[in-house]
Amino acid sequence: MSIILVEINKKRSFPMLVMAVKLVDENNLRELPDEERFTACVDILKNEKDESKRWDAVWLIGELAENKKQGDPMFDKVSEMIEFVIKHDNNGVVKHEACFQIAARNMRKKIPVLVNAALHDKSVLTQHEAIEALGLMRAFEAEELIKKALKDPSVDVRETAEFVLKRFSRLKDQGEYRPYEIL
């Protein structure tokens, strides 16, 4: 279940939307030490047939990268597993979540993975989220590649590319992307 909360941004006079997700953790994976949690999530992501459980595992593994930076061993392991999901999972919803986790955790080394998913994934939902994640991350280095999506057969992919390119033009001089804490 997703709940949208509105938080007042102190620097601006408009509300900022923050998403809070009630996640199913029926196996209490959050209570495990990080390495055990990582291993349990990898097992789910590689072997579980139920896509709803794989989606939960993407979220739970993504949390392990929270407040860590590239170069931290756990951040890097999570980043590699998220890439694995985008390249190998057979469900667009699960891959959609993996794309979001790349942006949410600012996994900048995975920008090429997002570009590839944006332009070549068989799931329109995954393509959409990959483009949106690139926009969220202010991946200006991918701008020319995102322009290729303006010719995609899917109107949803084209509209997302157009949206992100417009957003890029507004954000060019607004500084570096810093992910917000996910509630």
Image: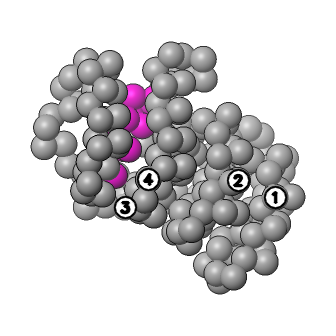
Image quarter (top left, top right, bottom left or bottom right) of the N terminus: bottom left
Where does label 2 land, which residue? 115
Please state if 101 lies on the left or on the right of 167 as rendered.
left
Is label 2 or label 3 in front? Answer: 2
> Mark 3 or mark 1: which comes first in sequence?
3
In the image, which is nearer the foreground, mark 2 or mark 4?
Answer: 4
Q: Residue at x 50, y 41 (%)?
A: 84
Between the C-alphas of marks 3 and 4, the distance is 27 Å
Residue 148 falls left or right of residue 24: right
Residue indicated by mark 4: 89
Q: Secondary structure at mark 2?
A: helix
For the residues labelled 1 and 4, the Cα–Cα distance comes to 23 Å
Q: Is residue 97 visible?
A: no
Q: Nearer the viewer, residue 123 or 14?
A: 123
**Looking at the image, residue 26 lies above or below residue 120:** above
Residue under pointer 3: 4
Looking at the rendered structure, the secondary structure element under dot 1 is helix
Q: CA distance from mark 2 to mark 1?
A: 7 Å
Query: Where are the magenta residues, as a range?
Result: 55-66
According to the picture, the residue beneath numbered tag 1 turns out to be 145
Q: In the rendering, at what x and y percent does residue 53 appear?
A: 25, 51
First in sequence, mark 2 or 1: give its number: 2
Q: Earlier in the sequence, mark 2 or mark 3?
A: 3
Main SS, magenta residues? helix
Q: CA distance from mark 2 to mark 3?
A: 28 Å
